[in-house]
Amino acid sequence: MSSEVEAEAEAEAEYFCKDFDWEELRSEVEGNPCFAHHFLSAPSSSSPSPQSDVQAWKRFHLRHSSGKFFRERRYLLKEFPELISCPPHSKLLEIGCGNGSTVLPILRANKDAIVYACDCSDETLERAKEIVSAAITGAPVQHRFRTFCCDLATDGYPNWLACNPCRHKFLQNQSHCLLGFRKDDGLHYTNLNPSEEFGCCVGGVDFVTLIFTLSAVPLERMPKSIKECFIVLKPGGMVFFRDYGLYDMTMLRFEPHKRVGFREYMRSDGTRSYFFCLDTVRNLFLGAGFTELELDYCCVKSVNRQKGKCMQRVWVHGKFQKPAVSCQ
Ligand SMILES: C[S@@+](CC[C@H](N)C(=O)[O-])C[C@H]1O[C@@H](n2cnc3c(N)ncnc32)[C@H](O)[C@@H]1O
């Protein structure tokens, strides 16, 4: 793993907090001529092929197959307490799961949660399964952890997760209450025991986690990716979002030739990273039909002990809900 990725992984393991003010950082950065290249309009580059992004991630996982890339994100349980307090048998989809850094703390802390996890790399899915099976002892975890390969930028989610009739019913029945369960309407609500499920699919999910994954997708494909999350969520379901924020230290370190778009950069290994401002995140989620529950910058000062340097990290924390109008 490059020291750059290592430093990112380490600093990401911080809790949601505000060590500094984002507006102050913004005026510092925008007033500094050294950073002028970051504000230029998008470089004119041909549209990236979806395959090249996915291939870059596949190569990344092959190179880092030792699992060193893995770091458990325990802080997510504090950021998103619903992951623990949700009703029994709640279903969660982790998108771009990598080696399982997000799914492992959830499976460990919530013994009733059912977790589906996808990634574009088969290699990393295998590693995630190994890591989860080795870490969770006692009751077998296979019946509540299922992985599948999927490109979130171009594919829809599989029908076994939410079949077409259920997807349509989600849209038609958003006026029904999430916590209500009506035997006659064929919908799969949060408090439904898995044994009572209908045969067609698992009935959609109650939660989606998008943790440092959306930034890997080209900006132009993000609206489709968010719309697909909306489609597989049950009415009232939530997305928990965390990703790189505008003027994060890792953005400011990118050299001019690494820019591939406005606020979009490509690392030397071909993986890309977008840096979000709050409005971009808001527009993506509201544009897909979500309601905003929480959205803010998380600004953390982190010290690189080896180099004795203080790093100003910026992430975006967000919580969005698929509307569920109250019971009549
Ligand atoms: C920075 S890692 C985040 C992993 C995980 N969410 C976590 O919390 O550590 C980004 C992940 O997104 C995956 N990814 C990137 N582009 C993808 C795509 N188009 N479809 C599915 N997964 C993708 C990568 O393979 C990688 O595992």
Image: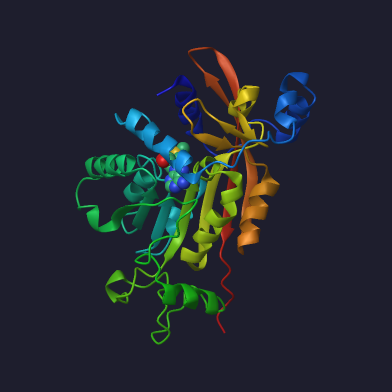
Judge from the rendering whether residue 215 lies leftward or rightward of residue 19; answer left or right. left
The tally of labels here is 0
Q: Quadrant of residue 323?
A: bottom right
Residue 29 lies in quadrant: top right
The furthest residue to the top: 307
Give how far across and how far down residue 25 sits, in percent: 72, 29
Residue at far bottom of view:
184
If the image is split into quadrants, where does the N terminus sit? top left
Left or right: residue 128 compared with residue 238: left
Q: Is residue 74 visible?
A: no
Q: Position of residue 36 (x, y in %)?
A: 75, 24
Quarter holding the C terminus? bottom right
In what quadrant does ligand 1 lie? top left
Left or right, 78 with reference to 1 = right
Relative height, residue 53 to residue 171 (above, below): above
What is the image's colouring? rainbow
Query: Does residue 51 appear in this view?
Result: yes
Residue 234 or residue 123, whichever sits in front: 123
- State the residue lying farthest toward the front: 46
Say which residue appears at 39% left-offset and 71% top-offset: 163
Q: Give above or below for 155 relative to 269.
A: below
Q: Residue at x 40, y 64 (%)?
A: 87
Q: Residue at x 74, y 31 (%)?
A: 39
**Residue 103: % across, % down:** 37, 47
Locate residue 296, reporting x and y percent.
65, 45
Q: Quadrant of residue 135?
A: top left
